[in-house]
Every structure is written in C-alpha cells, then in structure tokens.
Image (spheres, rainbow, N blue to C red):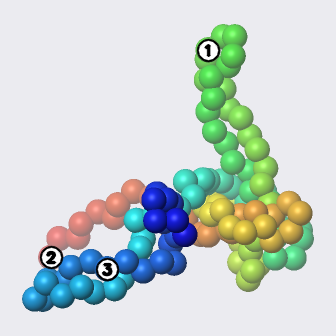
Amino acid sequence: MLLGSSFMSPLQLHLTPSNAGGAMAARPALLGRISAAKQLTGRVVTTKADKTVGVEVVRLAPHPKYHRRERIKKKYQAHDPDNQFKVGDVVELLRSRPISKTKHFLAVPVPPQGPAPAPTRV
C-alpha cells in the first residue's frame, strides 16, 4: 500500500490512543468500510423452489410524463435456507454474495407491526 494513498482496507489495523495512560491500542479500522444500502422489503409470492422464495417488492415512482406516483412491482429471488417462509409473509431482503444466477439476496423475517396492545389496569 502506498503511503500517500487515501484508500483504507477494512482488514488493516491502526493504532489509536486508549483511555488508560495514553498507550496505543490496536483495533480494526472500521471507518473505511461501507455497508450496502440496498435493503428491500416485500411480500413472498412463491415458495415452489427448494431454499428459494420469490419476493415481490412494491415501490412508488413518478410517471415520466404525468408526474403522478405509480406503483412499480419487481420480483426478486431470495435465499431461504430453512424453507421457513410461506406465501404472504413479509420479509426483508439483504444483499449478499451471488448464491446462484438469479439469487443475490437473503430473506430475513420482519417482525409483525400491529397496533400496540392496550395497557391493562391492575
């Protein structure tokens, strides 16, 4: 690595002053890491393949001519290693390494968002 380079590998260690006595402590350089911002939420529409679910993601986008927002649907294939999802489940898609030709996401369950339970009086 060049000394004047501004690129920082996430595996490099750099020295930072610690709180105890000003000694230098080694810790991983996490400042240079950038996580993927592609996080999608959708509904499972098919579970026919083994360890794979088809997820339909709906987003709103403006119409090019009329400037009214319209629903745009796109279907993604996601990895479901335990075959735990059923049709209609809401899942979150996390980008991962390519698992197959069409699978680049991992399906993660989203906790149900319902109305908060009413407080009980004692």
Q: Which residue is mark 2?
A: 122
Of the residues tagged 1 and 2, which is closer to the observer? Answer: 1
Q: Which residue is mark 3?
A: 15
Q: x%, y% of residue 80? A: 74, 74
**How far, Cα to Cα, is label 1 from label 2?**
54 Å
Q: What residue sits 71% from the left and 64% below the top?
A: 105
Q: Which residue is mark 1?
A: 67
Which image quarter is the N terminus in? bottom right
Q: In the figure, is residue 55 to the left or right of 33?
A: right
* Furthest-front residue in this view: 3
Which image quarter is the C terminus in? bottom left
Q: Between 97 and 1, which is closer to the camera in this rendering?
A: 1
Please indicate, yes or no, whether residue 74 appears anywhere in the rendered image.
yes
Instruction: Please state which amino acid type lies under the numbered disc 2.
Output: Val
Q: In the figure, is residue 99 to the left or right of 108?
A: right
Q: Quadrant of residue 50?
A: bottom right
Q: Tag 2, which secondary structure? A: loop
Q: Between 75 and 27, which is closer to the camera in this rendering?
A: 27
Q: x%, y% of residue 39? A: 58, 55
